[in-house]
Amino acid sequence: MAITDDLRKTLSDPTPLYFAAGTADLALQQAKKVPALVEQLRAEAPARIEAVRNTDPKAVQERAAARAKEAQETLQTKVTEFIGTLDVDLKKLGESAQDLALRGVGVAAEYAVKAREAYEKVAEHGEQAVKGWRGEAAEEIEDLAIAVEGKPEPVQAEPKPADDEAETAADKKAAAKKAPAPRKATATKKTTPPAK
């Protein structure tokens, strides 16, 4: 029974659906920005293409070779420094490996928490988007207003003052109509058949 309860709980949880709705809503918001970016790229494209055409391929090749040489030299110095600072003591290596593993677990846990928070934020955004699509947001605002202000009391019209006699006569007639007629007690006599 626990498995069916778990399945029922998992399948009835709307959070993944809200997450999907929130993702779709955020994607729609980002998609609305695309036309402006396309226009910007269209305006800048001729200048960029002209700049590429005017560059000298030999100059680009020389700059790339210089960067590659710098990167190689930097890499060699870093590797040499690392090897020089590497402690050969196995005990220290083991401790540092264990420390790194624990740090990795801590970082993984931190990322899991951040991912969960982001998931919940997007799901909450999706829930609000769905409520907006359905028009439930207005209903919730009305419910909140009623809870804060209280329910409005119905306005009762007060009767106009009239003749006391006419009022009392009307009240008596209404009371007479509403009140049931008093029952008369009827005594039923049981007769015994005559003896023969």
Image (tube, rainbow, N blue to C red):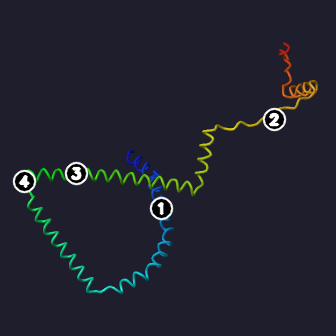
Residue 156 placement, left or right of 94: right
- The residue identified by callout 4 is 90
Question: Percent position (x, y) of residue 117?
Answer: 39, 51
Q: Do the residues labelled 4 and 1 touch (CB within 8 Å)?
A: no
| Nearest to N terminus: mark 2 or mark 3 | 3
Q: 65 or 24, which lies in front? A: 65
**Vertical placement of residue 165 versus 95, above or below:** above
x then y, percent, for residue 10: 42, 51
| Disc nearer the start of the sequence (3/4) | 4
Q: Are marks 2 and 1 in contact (CB under 8 Å)?
A: no
The mark found on residue 26 in the picture is: 1
Q: Mark 2 and mark 1: span between their CA atoms?
A: 53 Å
Task: Look at 11% across and 62% down and name the residue there.
Answer: 81
Residue at 41% x, 48% y: name it: 4
- Looking at the image, is mark 2 or mark 3 nearer the viewer? 3
What residue would you read off at disc 3?
103
Instruction: Tell me if mark 3 has few (under 14), some (14-19) or many (20+) residues whose alpha carbon lies within 10 angstroms of its own.
Output: few
